[in-house]
């Protein structure tokens, strides 16, 4: 396993990270335990979750699974998207963030989180309030680094400016949808992160499974056990252009002796400013398959072909983004 600095910080994270959105939904406690320990055993140290995943079950499961191995993990969680219907159950106000951090710490059975991320930009809370709260969390020892998620480039830059002006902790990283099926971050976000030393943590690196080759345009059938079957809302992503891209990537992967998943992840790992790529798993075999990406060297010719087939997705709409209404 190779490790990279998270942004310009001194924190080293595995170039492949484990996303745990499926823990508590498509993976039960026992299965999740196996996946998490399998990841740690193979050098994956970056574990990403959020307070809303599986209605808090993801954090609880991780807390149980990490009881004896907390020191092996760089543990990241998030807050800011709606937790309930109450007036203060969402956003990045001081009230909500401090409440949610305490809840997350209890579920995760830890005294601190390594990376605390604002799940989305909150237009109703002054950034000064959010950033001062994050700074206090770091000063208290309950948080070590802070990051953003689903922020536009200008929102991150504004936050950095406020932090530098007031001496607050600075955003170390940002999560965004980024893959061969969504290259929109390359327009503004990637240049901003390179300039300001912010590490990019892509989510949906396989476009929810579309880049694995499991979907095809010939029969239109939804594979058994796929995200499209278990989460009907996912079907909105099954546009013909996305399916066709998956088929093109699958052909290139087969021609070069790789799986489409591993090739897609390897391409993303080598994009500028990317610190770690988080990918989920519902079984250890799936994790093993994804780890094949670590051994892939993409030569210039193959890289050019991948860039060409995915070029329409630079100027398209984001594959996914999560914002407060």
Image: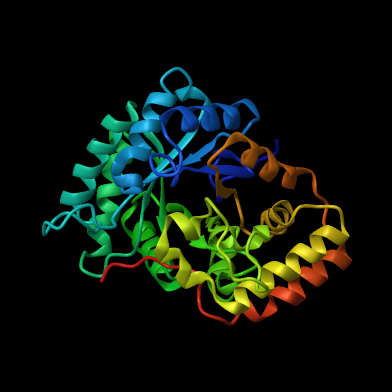
Left or right? Give the position of 199 relative to 162. right
- The colouring scheme, among rainbow, by chain, secondary structure or one colour, is rainbow
Vertical comparison of 41 with 187: above or below: above
Q: Residue at x 63, y 72 (%)?
A: 243
Residue 123 place in picture, x, y as percent = 26, 70
User: Where residue 174 sits: x, y (%)?
Assistant: 47, 57
For image coordinates 62% across by 58% down, the residue present is 273
Q: Quarter holding the N terminus? A: top right
Q: Is residue 141 visible?
A: no
Q: Position of residue 253 (x, y in %)?
A: 80, 59
Front residue of 16/218: it is 218
278 relative to 29, above or below: below
Location of the C terminus (image quadrant): bottom left
Q: Residue 100 at x, y = what percent?
A: 23, 44
Q: Nearer the viewer, residue 181 or 6?
A: 181
Q: In the orientation shown, which residue stands out farthest toward the top?
A: 68
Res. 223 image quadrant: bottom right
Say whether residue 86 is left or right of residue 135: left
């Amino acid at each position: 396993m190779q490790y990279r600095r998270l942004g310009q910080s001194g924190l080293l994270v595995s170039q492949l990270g484990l996303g745990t959105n499926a823990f508590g939904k498509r993976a039960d406690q026992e299965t999740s335990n196996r996946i998490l320990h399998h990841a740690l055993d193979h050098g994956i140290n970056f574990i990403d979750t959020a307070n809303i995943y599986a209605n808090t079950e993801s954090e609880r499961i991780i807390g149980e699974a990490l009881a004896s191995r907390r020191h092996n993990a760089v543990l990241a969680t998030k807050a800011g998207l709606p937790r309930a219907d109450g007036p203060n159950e969402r956003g990045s106000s001081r009230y909500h963030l401090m409440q949610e951090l305490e809840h997350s710490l209890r579920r995760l059975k830890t005294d601190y989180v390594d990376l605390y991320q604002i799940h989305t930009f909150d237009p109703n809370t002054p950034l000064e309030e959010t950033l001062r709260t994050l700074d206090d969390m770091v000063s208290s020892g309950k948080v070590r680094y802070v990051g953003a998620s689903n922020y536009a480039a200008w929102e991150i830059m504004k936050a950095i400016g406020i932090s530098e002006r007031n001496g607050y902790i600075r955003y170390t990283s940002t999560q965004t949808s980024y893959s061969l099926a969504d290259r929109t971050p390359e327009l503004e976000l990637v240049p901003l992160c390179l300039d300001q030393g912010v590490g990019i943590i892509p989510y949906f690196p396989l476009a929810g499974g579309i880049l694995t080759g499991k979907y095809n345009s010939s029969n239109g059938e939804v594979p058994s056990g796929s995200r499209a079957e278990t989460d009907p809302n996912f079907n909105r992503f099954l546009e013909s252009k996305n399916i066709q891209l998956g088929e093109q990537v699958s052909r290139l992967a087969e021609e070069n002796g790789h799986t489409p998943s591993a090739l897609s992840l390897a391409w993303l790992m080598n994009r500028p400013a990317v610190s770690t790529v988080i990918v989920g798993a519902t079984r250890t075999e799936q994790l093993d398959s994804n780890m094949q990406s670590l051994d892939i060297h993409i030569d210039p010719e193959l890289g050019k072909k991948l860039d060409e087939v995915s070029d329409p997705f630079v100027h398209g709409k984001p594959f996914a983004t999560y914002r407060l209404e």
